[in-house]
Image: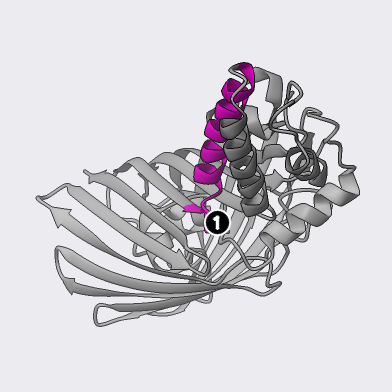
Amino acid sequence: MMMNKTALFTAISAVFLSQFAFAGQDYFEARSDAMGGTGVAASNIEGAAFANPALLSLPSMRDQGVTLLLPTLGLDAADKDDMIDKIDLLQDDYDALQTAIDNANPTAVDTYRNALVSDLVSLQDNNAYLSGGIGLSISMPSKGMSWGLLYKTYIDGFGIADISDEDIVLLSTLDPVNPPEIGDLTSQGRVIAGAISDIGVAVSMPLSIVNMPVTVGVTPKIQRLDSFNYGVSANNFDEGDFDGSDYSNDETGFNLDVGIAIEPMHGMVIGLAGRNLIKRELDTVESEGIQATYRVGPTVTVGVAYQWDGFTVTTDLDLLENEKFVGLEGTQYWRVGGEYQAMDWLALRLGYRHDLNDVTANLYSLGTGFVIGKSFKLDLSGMFGNDNAYGAALQTSYHF
C-alpha cells in the first residue's frame, strides 16, 4: 500500500497532535529535565555547555574547578495503544493462519483469519513514540576564558500502523474450506526517526558593563545528522530493524551555538541562547514509496533564573519553532522549574513544560541530586504527561 507524502504528513500530524512530549531542547541533562527543561539561565557547571556556553564564565562558576559529566542518559516514550504488542500478536496470528492453510484445516483457518481481522482493526490509528539521548562534557571555568568540551547524541522517532481496508476485506471474505495462498499484508508498520550528534568546544569570555557581569559564549561543533525511514508489511515488521543500512541515511557538517548571560543583580541571571544557527536538512531514504526530510534549524531561547536562600526558580521561553520534519508543525516551549537545596548533599527539583503550539503534550517533571563524597554527584529525573508519556534521565558527574 502506497501513500503519498501529503497523506503521510496528515497521518504523522495526527500522531503528533497532543500525543507526545519531546525533550524539546534536543538534549537530555538530568537537572535541566527535572526542572522542566530549563537551563538557558539556570544551568549549573554540568549542563552549561549544552544549554548556554556563556554561563561557563559567570562569577558563580569561575571557582568550581574541572567538572566531568560522564555520562548523561535520557529516554522518553509513549505507546498508549500498545502498538508494538499488537503487531507481535498480529504476526503470531498471521503465521498460524498460514500454517492452517498449509495443513488444510478449515476450523483453524476460520479461527485465525477472524483473529487477524480483529488484530488489524485494533491497530487502526495506532502510534508510538520514543526519544533517547546520551552526552558527556568536560568543563574548565576560570577567571578569564572558560571552556568546555562536549559530545551528545539525541534521537527522536515515531511509529505508526498504516492499516489497509483491502486486507480486512480480503480476510473477512476468505473461504476457510478452499482458502487461497496468502501473501504479505498490504498494511504496514513504519518508523520514521532523526538523530543529531554533536562534538563541540564551548568557549566563554567575561565582560563587564558598568560593573554588571556579562558573559558571552560560542560553541563551534561538528554535527552528524542521521535519518531513518523503515516501512514494511505489518507481518514482517520488526522495530529493531529501523536503523538498518537499507533504511538509514547520514550526513556530516558544521554548526554553531552562541549565548549571552547577564547578572543584573546578585542571584539573578538573564540568558539568551541560539543553537544550531545553520539550518541543515537531510532526506530519508525512500521506503515503500514514502520519503521524509529531517530538519535541524535555528532555535533561540531566552531564560531568567533567580536564586536565594537555597531556592532557585527559573523559566525559559522558545522564541522560534523547532521543526523536526519538513512539512510538520514545530514545537515551541515555555518551561518553568525550581530547585531547593535541602542539604549540602541533597537537592529537590520540580518542573513543567508547555508547547505553545499544542503539538505535543504538556510534561511534568521531578528529580533529585545527591553529592556523594567530595567529588561524585548523581542526578535523577522523571517525566510524565498525557497519554501515558513517560521519561527519565540519569547522570553522574565528577568534580575536581
Residue 84 painted magenta:
yes
Pick the residue in front: 123 or 115.
115
Q: Residue at x 27, y 45 (%)?
A: 396
Tag 1's secondary structure?
Answer: loop
Q: Quadrant of the C terminus?
A: top left
Q: Which residue is mark 1?
A: 81
Magenta portion: prevailing SS class? helix
Q: Quadrant of the N terminus?
A: top right
Left or right: 286, with 251 as reference point: right
Residue 291 placement (x, y as % from top left): 82, 36
What is the span of residues highlighted in magenta in the rendered image?
77-102
The answer to whether one can see residue 194 in this image is yes
Residue 76 placement (x, y as % from top left): 47, 52
Residue 170 painted magenta:
no
Pick the residue in front: 115 or 79.
115
Residue 318 placement (x, y as % from top left): 64, 68
Residue count near mark 1 (Cα–Cα under 10 Å), binned few <14, some 14–19, many ≥20: some
- Total marks shown come to 1
Residue 152 placement (x, y as % from top left): 49, 39
Relative vertical location of residue 321 with respect to residue 399 in this rendering, above or below? below
Relative vertical location of residue 268 with respect to residue 162 in this rendering, above or below? below
Left or right: 373, with 309 as reference point: left
Q: Residue at x 43, y 66 (%)?
A: 384
Pick the residue in front: 384 or 377.
384
Residue type for callout 1: Asp
Left or right: 55, with 159 as reference point: left
Image quadrant where residue 314 sits: bottom left
The answer to whether one can see residue 237 in this image is no
Pick the residue in front: 174 or 60.
174
Relative vertical location of residue 189 with respect to residue 75 in this rendering, above or below? above
Farthest left residue in view = 373
